[in-house]
Image (spheres, rainbow, N blue to C red):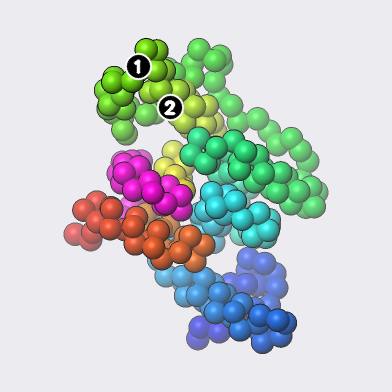
């Protein structure tokens, strides 16, 4: 297939619609956009449509680009993502982008679900039996991948904050979200790398979570594929920042 044919095929798979032509006020721009994302990037690397849409949904949630998020929640369903997988991908953005942006994304997601006749609320994915387990179970996930360096790094904070800040991280990021079912740890870690890359200015965390994604079972190629797939949404500067930050981890053997 040539590039035009690849773009048309991918648009049909994801959106059940034809690729852009020259019609409309900005047909030429849409052809460039679709050609790059759906004709080039979507055919480069190992990820399937389902995983690519989870990456896209994560990036669009991070950037709070709600019209595009709405389109890609639908594309995710078309690509075989379950509603629970989509919801979990959006939920786990909260500790990184804040609750307000995440709530806006959830509202957009639920709008698409209702349009597709999906009953809400979706099944609960919480696995904790009590709030007391938030720290214990969170640390069980955090420590093997990231160690306990965070707690040591913030002993300089005044008063209760020296213990509270690391504890909040463990309880919220790993306890409240990473203990949930619906996405495995391998997928959660890969999506977190893309999320942090899309944020910009979080290169230290990108490198840490890229290493975590590898420890969780992702390959170097998969991490690079996810970042390159995100480039059409977050831009090349953030792609190159992430790749350069993780060069030692991701360079081929």
Q: Residue at x 50, y 86 (%)?
A: 2
Q: Looking at the picture, does residue 18 appear above or below residue 59?
A: below
Picture coordinates of residue 1, whole percent (x, y): 51, 84
Residue 60 in magenta? Answer: no
Picture coordinates of residue 161, whole percent (x, y): 39, 18
Residue 9 visible, this orientation: no
Residue carrying label 2: 169
**Magenta range:** 196-221
Residue carrying label 1: 158
Specify whether 236 is left or right of 149: right
Q: Main secondary structure of the magenta part?
A: helix
Picture coordinates of residue 20, whole percent (x, y): 65, 80
Q: Looking at the picture, does residue 36 appear above or below residue 22?
A: above
Quadrant where the C terminus is found in the figure: bottom left
Q: Residue at x 51, y 59 (%)?
A: 52
Spatial separation of the CA atoms under disc 2 and disc 1: 17 Å
Picture coordinates of residue 22, whole percent (x, y): 66, 87
Residue 216 in magenta? Answer: yes
Element type at marker 2?
helix
């Amino acid at each position: 297939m040539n590039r035009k044919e690849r773009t048309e095929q991918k648009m049909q798979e994801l959106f059940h619609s034809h690729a852009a032509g020259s019609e409309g006020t900005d047909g030429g721009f849409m052809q460039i956009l679709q050609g790059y994302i759906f004709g080039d990037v979507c055919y480069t690397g190992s990820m399937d449509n389902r995983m690519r849409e989870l990456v896209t949904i994560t990036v669009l949630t991070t950037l709070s680009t709600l019209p595009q998020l709405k389109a890609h929640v639908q594309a995710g369903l078309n690509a075989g993502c379950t509603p629970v997988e989509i919801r979990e991908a959006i939920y786990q953005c909260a500790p990184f982008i804040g609750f307000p942006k995440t709530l806006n994304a959830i509202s957009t997601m639920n709008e698409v679900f209702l349009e597709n006749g999906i009953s809400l609320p979706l099944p609960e994915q919480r696995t904790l039996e009590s709030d007391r387990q938030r720290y214990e179970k969170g640390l069980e996930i955090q420590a093997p991948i990231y160690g306990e360096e965070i707690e040591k790094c913030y002993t300089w904070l005044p008063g209760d904050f020296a213990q509270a800040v690391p504890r909040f991280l463990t309880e919220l990021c790993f306890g409240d979200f990473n203990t949930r079912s619906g996405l495995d740890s391998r997928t959660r870690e890969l999506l977190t790398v893309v999320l942090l890359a899309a944020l910009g200015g979080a290169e230290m965390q990108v490198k840490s979570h890229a290493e975590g994604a590898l420890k969780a079972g992702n390959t170097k190629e998969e991490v690079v594929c996810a970042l390159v797939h995100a480039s059409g949404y977050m831009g090349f500067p953030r792609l190159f920042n992430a790749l350069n930050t993780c060069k030692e981890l991701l360079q081929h053997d």
